[in-house]
Amino acid sequence: MGENKLCLGCMEKKGTALICPHCGYEEGTSYLPSYIKPGTMLNNRYLVGKLLISNGEGATYIGYDTVITCKVVIREYMPENLCTRVKGKPIISVNYNHLAQYKALMAEFTELNKSLAKMRTLSHIVPALDLFAENNTTYAIYEYIESISLIDYLKENAGELSWEQVSKLFPPLFTTLGIIHNTGIIHRGISPNTIYYTPKGELKLMDFCVSAVRTANTELVSEIFQGYAAPEQYSLSSRQGTWTDVYSICAVLYRILTGCMPTDALSRMDNDNLCPPHEINTNVPKNISMVIMDGLKLAGRERIQTITELVTRLFEQVDNQAKGYTATITIPKSKLDAVLKEEKQNNRYIAPEVNYDDMYVDEVEGTEVTQQSSLERIKVAVIIGVLLLAILMVIVTILLSVFNGDDTEKIKSGVDSFSSLDNVVMVTTNTEDITTESTEITTTMEEKDSIMPNLIGKSFEIQKSAHAGWITLEPVYEYNNEYESGLIFDQEIQEGEKFASGSTVKVWVSKGSENVVIPSFAGLKLDDYLQKLAALGIRYEQKAEENFNYQNGYVTRTSKEPGNTINVKNGDILVVYYAENPDITTDATNSSTDNNANGNQQADTVIVVD
């Protein structure tokens, strides 16, 4: 047995050696206690190796499938902001205050991987092969792919590629990404670090995550790839969709063709000085450069919206400065069919049947995507001609192979039978142990499957964005003397009560106190003072008066003295007086003129007496 001992660093056989001859990993190497100890067995099948990467969503380990004896990649859902690891154990503990968020994001994690598993025939992604619940969390098992990141591949190729190389390498990836978008999945993290190059000369898109990880200011530690993330990923209030991935893939093309990483979106919003690719590298065709810049526009609605539109513009235009060369996508349907047939014949690994009950199928609305109608696709096909029509036929063919027939049934027997939320338990501040007495939360589509968090005293706008896709908050605005304007002071479903995920819940939002202190008007012009009153919600009436102690247009007094309060809820009105004084010089002159006129008139008057 000793001669077959596996290295926990690379899962290659190292025998009895303490230091692996393949990767140099030393047996007994220390590990971070926040992550699983190397050598741990999961689901009585998967051997956990060293940690590979981690982000706000969870941790990724190298692993080994002891049943079919091959390397795998193990992804553990473990949002560090919402949970902790029980000391000395692989179990994750979830604080009660974070349980609802933890479960909602785990549902999204599960649904994401189940959706990707159904697209396992796409050779340019790495879908989940198995899903199971253990240790109070969820694990996804992926095929181990020998590959290097695109950024490392570029380093081996002088830091950049020509457009001719790109036009041969990227079309299959574009097609795959278009199919993924059509199912409602947005990657949000496309970069040279998440695209990998295989020994077969293929590109694979990896590292799909829940949407909150790839958006700033959410409850999770964000993973935003500087230079490749779209502007809308830096704001909770901005809509994301297919155009978000268009920005990222265009940023990748920019980097590949110029050797320079594009300026990050936040910096561009302050000062957009991004140079077109052909100005950095004159070998880049100008029309390609223009398309990439259109895909990198800061305003989402002005940007190229879909991968289909991007592909059309990249590969259906003639570059007049490139010796008449016309670049087109060449993806013969027969070739793709042959690839799919070969994959089936090779009997690629399918997750075995696992006996889990009460499958959780809650719809998670974390991803927002613009759907194209069939009519719009037909219009596009008519415009771009026969080539795009062929591409669409390929997409339809692949989708049919994915969602119909035997493949679907095989997937349903494994991944689709998974329920990740059955075993989540509530844990208090004691993280040393989890006992069997902890309350289990079981979920189905029809039952109340979530626990209402405490929203009182928190900003409505922040909570609305933070819980989007899990709770729809319906505001009722009222005056409240205890809570500042914009804060929630009551909620329809109280903290700790159960509710169905996706429900609409009323919350009462403070409009501020109904008794508002009247501000001082000292030294203020009328317009400036009225703006202050309007900002405080105080209704007012303005009246002019003669007061030579103030310059014209300045406030002279109010019907209630500043420092007193006025009830804005009852609609009490504050009368604001301002100076409107006559011009003394003009009046004196007019008065003198009038007197002279009257005197002359009297002198000329003749009184006749009968």
Image (spheres, helix red, strand yellow):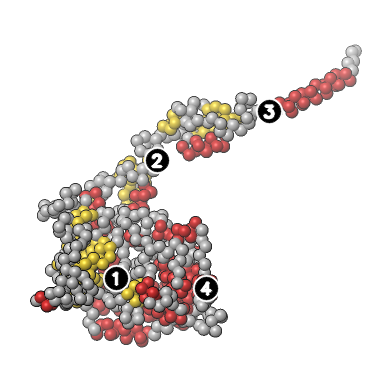
Q: Is mark 2 on a helix, strand or loop?
A: loop
Q: Which of 608 and 212 is in front in this view?
A: 212
The residue drawn where x is 34% and y is 53% is 466
Snapshot quadrant of residue 359? bottom left
Residue 152 location, x and y as percent?
A: 36, 73
- Amino acid carrying label 3: it is Pro
Snapshot quadrant of residue 242? bottom left
- Amino acid carrying label 4: it is His
In the rendered image, which residue does mark 4 sit on? 278
Dots 4, 3 in contact, CB < 8 A: no
Which circle's residue, 1 or 4, is located before the other in the chain? 1
Residue 475 location, x and y as percent?
A: 37, 46
Residue 40 location, x and y as percent?
A: 15, 66
Q: Which of marks 4 and 2 is in front?
A: 4
- Amino acid carrying label 1: it is Leu
Does any portion of residue 193 appear in the rendered image?
A: yes
Label 4 vs label 2: CA separation? 51 Å
Q: Residues within 10 Å of mark 2 (few under 14, many from 20)?
A: some
Which circle's residue, 1 or 2, is located before the other in the chain? 1
Which circle's residue, 4 or 3, is located before the other in the chain? 4
In the rendered image, which residue does mark 3 sit on? 582
The residue drawn where x is 55% and y is 84% is 323
Label 1 vs label 2: CA separation? 44 Å
Q: Which residue lies furthest to the top in this view?
A: 610
In the rendered image, which residue does mark 2 sit on? 485
Q: Which of 552 and 274 is in front in this view?
A: 274
In the rendered image, which residue does mark 1 sit on? 116
